[in-house]
Image (tube, rainbow, N blue to C red):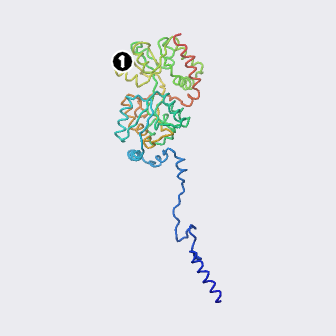
Amino acid sequence: MALKRLLVVVLAFFLAACGGSPSAAPEGDPPTADAPAAETQTTDPIEEASADPTGLERVYAEVEGLTGAERREALISLAEGEAGDLQLYTSQNLDDFAPISDAFQEATGIQPIPYRAGAETVRQRVMEEAAAGQSSADVIQFHSLEMTVLDREGLLAPLRSPETDNIMSSAVSDNWAGTWLNVYITAWSTDAIAPEEAPQSWEEVLTEYDGRIALESTDWGWFGTLVKDYFVAEQGMSEEEAVALFTEAATGGAAHQGHTAMAELLVAGEFDIAPSLYIDRVTQMKGDGLPIEWQEPVEPLIVLPDGIAISANVSHPAKALLYVEFMLTDGQQMLADAGLTPASPELSGIESYETITVDLDSMLDQQEKWQTLYEEQVLSAVGG
């Protein structure tokens, strides 16, 4: 028994000399119930950055559930932490852009830096920069056909904002929202066409003004929409019959490029009627007392939205979202004040008219078809 007690003492002495005890847990072992576990990191920072390389998802998370002034103030706070300027690629006329830019800077303290060119040029630049891995755009703003091309290329970020509720539903997509509307209307010279001779329908526009009509030479999307969604879908014509109407109208008529230029030629007496002018320009000219009219309107009016989006390669996500939401709220009234047609149903002024919004996917999928028909069949009859 004495020998047994001696062995226990020696064993205890040996364990103590090694820094341990029979009941001590080795360093690094799971803690006991008396020692709660420290919080462990469940998200790998590298994986998190890879899943949100631009930081836009973090911005969305920060402002989720916020609306109105509270949301804007939160975005301003986040934007203040972003180094560098907000880069805006736009086809908007800089005379219209400047007041909006000034108001945005006053409201947020942020000055957008614009690159301005035609819509096709802007789209090409975005695609070329993305291909080279040198994208500069934070926000992209131009018409929705070009926007849809970028969207299909994966170059637009998801747009999640309560402010899209301010915009007509046909001008809102998953990745962009409408800012203003290009509304195509038929307009005529009041010097050449008396009120009782004004057209009442699209059939009259295309059959009653032989040699007196002018077509805009790039309006294949307008043409395809009218053929497909009005003459065929609503009036029951065959596609061939509908195209023949346009060809008949073009015979002996004229073709010009540029909607503003055409409106000016119309009031100058170069032709009597034009079926695809923009409502904002015609309204302005009529208000200036020029001999141009469009009411009672020939319906349906064809609508092609201009849109705004955040680049998929955005460098300043809070600033970008802040600018997009400004355009969908304060900017809507400013666009109206500038004589444009805002995409807000409350401000557009077209809610009482029958309209057809261009089916963007359909037009792009069949662009070659409609462009060829318009250029080689309809416009080739001009002057004939």
Q: Position of residue 25 (x, y in %)?
A: 57, 72
Q: Tell me what residue is drawn at x 52 percent, y 46 percent.
A: 52
Question: Residue at the bottom extreme?
Answer: 2
Q: Tell me what residue is drawn at x 51 percent, y 22 percent.
A: 219
**The N terminus, quarter of image:** bottom right
Q: Is residue 74 left or right of residue 245?
A: left
Going by the numbered disc 1, the residue's amino acid type is: Leu
Observer-nearest residue: 311 or 327?
311
Observer-nearest residue: 75 or 267?
75
Q: Is residue 284 left or right of residue 362?
A: left
- Residue 223 versus residue 20 in the image, above or below: above
- Residue 17 versus residue 107 in the image, above or below: below
Give the SS element for disc 1: loop
Q: Residues within 10 Å of mark 1 (few under 14, many from 20)?
A: some
Q: Is residue 73 left or right of residue 136?
A: left
Determine which residue is flagged by label 1: 290
Regarding residue 110, the answer to whether it shows in the image is: yes
